Image: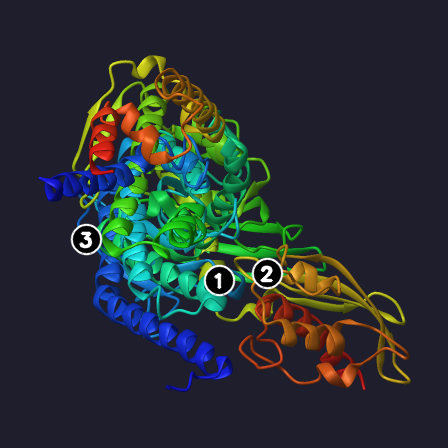
């Protein structure tokens, strides 16, 4: 019985790690990290999705590798080692995109190589992967990447709809295959798919997200991300109960 | 107890090991996908050719900057060195109605933040389509380019001199940096297109025109044209004076003075056409005024000019006139002996004028040189006109190191040895040898301008040598 509760508690903790990146510590909308690619990658839904996959790939494998070698790498040279690993992973995804999704690679352009200096990647490597287990690091990577992806996707939906009057979904592996739904084409506001529209949408997204979170997450006593994330999903009550019982 | 490795050994070991493993992984991935990436680019260009020229009957590659074995079977002129850094490949396309079009794979200068590799479709001296296929430009620049690409079409062509801003009204900051470099590249490929496609290879109607240079002055050349008759058009003879203000033989302005012609067609309407008194569009468009010779660059059955003859009051006379001028255009376009159009002469006791001029304008230069004949030095060189481009030849002639893709050391060497006048002056002896554009001292990225400049001074050196 005790063992089950411990397992359940551990499960909650893992879920908390995963959810932290999505809500409480959303890298884009809360921590304002990795903003460089957000404006250009949210001009269309397909760009946002592909940027999400690129960030996911790099974050997942960088956390995996860094967490695995954390005991081997001396503290003094950890940052250069992390950078080399991250740069390698970014170059790999860049080459893969060029080979298998050239249209997307062309459209995202320099923002793929720029993932190397994306604060989310190095930030998670330094703050999480280098201090936690492999499984936790992978969950953190998934959560953070998903948080980044969902933020980008929501901004992209808003921008593409207003900017083009609808949506165009293109097969990233074959740019000739695409489906368009443009009911408001004649009322499109091209400014929304330009830089200024990107910043405007981004500001709006932060505002809306903060409002939603504030209404659900108590600002005091939210000293841990775990607690806040659980609260949001109404799981915290159950976890508290389990915690007490374990103690 | 195990002895711990010194940090001086451990740190490089770990960093080096990480580097080697990462480099190995990258090399492996690169090896696996390099072929696919190159294939993607080629297939992208092929698709673009298909979309620019729908239903085309095929295409051939006629220029490849990275493969010297690719040759044009109908060479007109070589790509000027100044274009080399921009034009990567050129394809000649046969359209569905047997006309010729060109598709360029070319690279812009730095735009918003990097370069763009573009595929540009050209037909009848206009850009009918453009698409980005690579480069290092930022997403914003690429998006600006894509916005522009959406505007260009067969109905919405870009011609030389057009303003890019006319095509994209909602140009953001990135576009304002991207459009000028794209526009500049379009101007380059349009200029190059003249060299590659001007001659219609169909050969359905062709004039046999004898061209003689009657006079060659400092500012103009007078030609005599003798157009031979066949059943399709009226024969005629004329004197054509070419003003060389533009230093471009093919685009220079010409005025025509008719010497002999038969104007009897259609009850004397032929005479009215030749004298410029007829009221048809052909007469209004082509007769009695100074026109750029390139006006007559198209073949007579080309869709852009054919209606002018069809609707003329004296079709055969109009066609004959046009073919005579087209003959001069083709002659200058393909002239192998360019020296007959160059000029060198003495304008005062110590001053000489020299002009080197080419068909397409590259390497053309007009200059005045002051000579000290006793000590055999050029003491002053004044460039009156030249065709050097910004960032290349223009900068070099002004004694500045060009900012573009030139071979910096060699350009500096040329400036120091052949352009800058210090002390007594530039020894005339330096220009005594006849050179070709590929000679080592001229091959510097602004090679054609260097060649024109050198040759103009060489002409003076030769004249002085002859005088002596």
Query: Percent position (x, y) of residue B78?
Result: 45, 66
- Which residue is at 24% across, 34% downward? A243
Task: Give SS at disc 3.
Answer: loop
Q: Is residue B428 left or right of residue A58?
A: right
- Residue B218 disc label: none
Q: Is residue B203 visible?
A: no
Task: Give SS at disc 2.
Answer: loop
The Cα atoms of the two marked residues, 3 and 1, are separated by 27 Å
Q: Is residue A44 left or right of residue B280?
A: left
Label 1 packing within 10 angstroms: few (<14), some (14-19), many (20+): some
Q: In the rendered view, would you say A12 is above or below A138?
A: above
Label 2 packing within 10 angstroms: few (<14), some (14-19), many (20+): some
Q: Earlier in the sequence, mark 3 or mark 1?
A: 3
Closer to the camera in the image, A85 or B277:
A85
Q: In the rendered view, would you say B409 is above or below B159?
A: below
User: Which chain does tag 2 point to?
Assistant: B
Query: In the image, are marks 3 and 1 on the same chain?
Result: yes
Task: Give SS at disc 1.
Answer: loop
Query: In the image, are marks 2 and 3 on the same chain?
Result: yes
Q: Nearer the viewer, mark 3 or mark 1?
A: 1
Query: Percent position (x, y) of residue A28?
Result: 40, 35
User: Which chain does tag 3 point to?
Assistant: B
The picture quadrant where one finds residue B65 is: bottom left
Closer to the camera in the image, B393 or B241:
B393
Closer to the camera in the image, B238 or B73:
B73
What residue is shown with label 2? B404
What residue is shown with label 3? B58
What residue is shown with label 1? B85
Closer to the camera in the image, B393 or A227:
A227
Q: Are marks 2 and 1 in contact (CB under 8 Å)?
A: yes
User: Which chain does tag 1 point to?
Assistant: B
Which quadrant is the C terminus of chain B positioned in? bottom right
């Amino acid at each position: 019985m005790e063992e089950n509760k411990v397992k359940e508690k551990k499960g909650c903790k893992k879920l908390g790690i995963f959810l932290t990146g999505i809500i409480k510590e959303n890298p884009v909308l809360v921590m304002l990290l990795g903003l460089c690619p957000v404006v250009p990658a949210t001009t269309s839904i397909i760009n946002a999705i592909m940027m999400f996959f690129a960030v996911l790939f790099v974050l997942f494998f960088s956390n995996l590798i860094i967490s695995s070698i954390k005991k081997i790498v001396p503290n003094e040279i950890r940052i250069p080692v992390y950078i080399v690993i991250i740069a390698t992973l970014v170059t790999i995804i860049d080459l893969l995109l060029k080979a298998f999704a050239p249209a997307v690679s062309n459209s995202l352009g320099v923002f793929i190589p720029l993932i190397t200096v994306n604060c989310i990647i190095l930030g998670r490597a330094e703050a999480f992967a280098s201090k936690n287990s492999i499984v936790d690091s992978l969950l953190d990577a998934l959560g953070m990447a998903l948080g980044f992806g969902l933020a980008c996707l929501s901004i992209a939906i808003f921008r593409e709809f207003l900017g083009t009057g609808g949506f165009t979904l293109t097969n990233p592996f074959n740019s000739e295959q695409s489906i368009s739904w443009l009911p408001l084409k004649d009322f499109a506001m091209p400014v929304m798919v330009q830089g200024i529209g990107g910043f405007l949408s981004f500001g709006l997204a932060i505002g809306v997200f903060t409002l939603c979170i504030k209404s659900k997450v108590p600002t005091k006593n939210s000293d841990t991300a775990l607690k806040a994330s659980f609260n949001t999903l109404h799981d915290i009550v159950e976890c508290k109960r389990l915690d007490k019982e374990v103690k | 107890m195990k002895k711990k490795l010194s940090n001086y050994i451990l740190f490089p070991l770990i960093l080096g090991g990480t580097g080697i493993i990462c480099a190995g992984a990258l090399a492996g991935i690169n090896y696996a996908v390099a072929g696919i990436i190159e294939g993607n680019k080629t297939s992208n260009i092929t698709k673009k050719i298909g979309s620019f020229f729908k239903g085309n009957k095929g295409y051939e590659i006629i220029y490849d900057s990275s493969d010297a074995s690719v040759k044009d079977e109908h060479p007109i002129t070589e790509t000027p060195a100044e274009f080399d850094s921009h034009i990567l490949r050129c394809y000649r396309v046969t359209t569905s109605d047997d006309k010729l079009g060109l598709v360029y794979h070319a690279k812009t200068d730095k735009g918003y933040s990097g370069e763009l590799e573009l595929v540009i479709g050209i037909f009848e001296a206009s850009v009918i389509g453009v698409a980005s296929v690579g480069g290092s430009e930022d997403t914003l620049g690429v998006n600006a380019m894509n916005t522009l690409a959406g505007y260009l079409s067969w109905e919405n062509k870009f011609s030389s001199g057009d303003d890019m801003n006319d095509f994209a009204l909602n140009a953001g900051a990135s576009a304002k940096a991207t459009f000028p470099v794209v526009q500049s590249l379009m101007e380059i490929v349009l200029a190059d297109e003249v060299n590659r496609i001007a001659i219609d290879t169909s050969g359905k109607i062709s004039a046999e025109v004898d061209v003689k240079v009657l006079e060659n002055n400092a500012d103009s050349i007078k030609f005599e044209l003798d157009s031979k008759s066949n059943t399709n058009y009226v024969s005629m003879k004329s004197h054509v004076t070419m003003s060389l203000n533009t230093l471009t033989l093919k685009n220079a302005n010409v005025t025509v003075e008719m010497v002999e012609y038969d104007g009897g067609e259609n009850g004397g309407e032929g005479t009215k056409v030749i004298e410029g008194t007829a009221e048809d569009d052909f007469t209004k468009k082509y007769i009695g005024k100074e026109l750029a010779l390139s006006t007559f660059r198209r073949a007579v059955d080309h869709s852009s000019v054919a209606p002018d003859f069809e609707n003329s009051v004296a079709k055969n006379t109009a066609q004959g006139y046009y073919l005579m001028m087209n003959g001069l255009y083709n002659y200058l376009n393909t002239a192998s002996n360019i020296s007959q159009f160059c000029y060198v002469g003495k304008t005062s006791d110590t001053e000489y004028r020299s002009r080197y001029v080419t068909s397409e304008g590259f390497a053309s230069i007009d200059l005045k040189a002051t000579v000290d004949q006793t000590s055999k030095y050029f003491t002053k060189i004044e460039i009156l006109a030249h065709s050097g481009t910004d960032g290349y030849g223009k900068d070099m002639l002004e004694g500045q190191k060009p900012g573009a893709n030139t071979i910096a050391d060699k350009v500096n060497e040329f400036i120091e040895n052949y352009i800058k006048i210090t002390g007594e002056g530039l020894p005339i002896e330096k220009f005594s040898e006849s050179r070709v554009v590929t000679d080592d001292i001229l091959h510097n990225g602004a090679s054609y301008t260097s060649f024109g400049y050198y040759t103009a001074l060489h002409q003076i050196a030769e004249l002085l040598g002859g005088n002596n």
